[in-house]
Amino acid sequence: MKVLSRSALVAALVLATLLPAAARKKSRSHKATPSPSPDAAQIEAATRLQIFLDRANFSPGALDGTYNDLTLKALALYRQSRGEESSPSATPSPSHSPPAKSNAPPDTSGLDLDSFGSAFTTYTVTDADLQSTGTLPGSVAAQAKLKSLPYRDAAEAIAEKFHCTVHFLEQLNAGKTKTIKAGDQLKVPNVEPFELAAVKDLKPGSEIESLAANDMPDDPNSSDNQSSSAPKETLNNSQKAAISIKVDIQGNVLEVFDTDKLVAAYPVTIGSTQTASPIGEWKVRGIAKLPRFRYDKEMLQHGQRSGNFHILPPGPNSPVGVIWIALNKKGIGLHGTNEPETIGHSNSHGCIRLTNWDVVRLAQKVKPGVPVSIH
């Protein structure tokens, strides 16, 4: 048996004491290491795909720089419109789940994602952007006394203008969005901007006038029990246009067809159990720009009209947004929203709700007589 010298024995004891401590320290440092967050390149790649789809009229809803479910669904529909099969990575999760956010990129082969240049651009805030903002009281009664329902602040106005969530705008412009003023430069997604001031000049085909968009008189050709499409022989040539709309209430998506070709798709919010969206075959009756809205709590919650209501003024923060596309069923329409980040994963009060920028695009594709299938 080999006998260690006194100095060797002391060195061995010191080493034995230090090794467990070092191992414990390494273990603690490993546990304290946070999981990696998306880097700038990942955010830009996801945003680029969202912008590509948005520009192609296959909307992913409010941009947030992630591969969320609405983005994957839009990608699958875009590929479908081109006669391509969706890859498994482009298949969204169940439609009524909140839009999951992922850092795993889907298959984007064959897409010209560089077709629009940079994913982000620099925008200089204007006085007009600030003029669309103002004080927005919380109560419906107080809102009814206003001349319009404006954006709450400049960040909300700029976020909607560039089709993104306020949170994402803040993420892109750390520390700049709380005190935005005219002349400030902000980093924004490179989309076709939504111009609120231009809504009043739209020529969507046929406008309707009413005290409130959801309070028009009944269409004499409609039936609340079933399909309300007018017989084809009663429609003129312009109404026999090939455009048609299909609303998938399970998938929370509105699809636009030209003849049998899918040409656009927008995420939507559909009715709840208490106030379900009307299943059946309908048609577009007319379009109201910057509509007023009859707010009847009893009607919204239980589907029963009451005498206790408020007429809300128009504006981007109206519950029905900036456009109302009336169907030939009283009180039901395709319309905008004051909460774009909720589109695709919440419930409405029976109507079909889109983001303001998407409903403006939809309004320019339809006219009275266009069939709307809700299933």
Image (cartoon, helix red, strand yellow):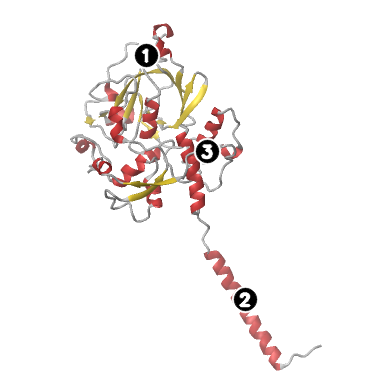
Left or right of residue 20, residue 56 in this image: left
Q: Is residue 18 above or below residue 259?
A: below
Left or right of residue 352, residue 9 in this image: right
**Label 3 amino acid?**
Leu
* Residue pictured at 49% horizontal, 30% vertical: 250
Nearer to me, 115 or 97? 115
Nearer to me, 59 or 297? 59
Whichever of callouts 2 and 1 sits on the residue coming sooner in the sequence is 2
Instruction: Kindly identify which residue carries mark 2.
Output: 20
Nearer to me, 14 or 128? 128
Q: Specify the quadrant that holds the N terminus.
A: bottom right
Instruction: Kindly identify which residue carries mark 1.
Output: 223
Q: Is residue 109 above or below residue 201?
A: below
* Residue pictured at 48% horizontal, 49% vertical: 43
Instruction: Kindly identify which residue carries mark 3.
Output: 72
- Could you tell me how far apart the alpha carbons at marks 1 and 3 are, in whole angstroms? 37 Å
SS label for mark 3: helix
**Label 1 amino acid?**
Ser
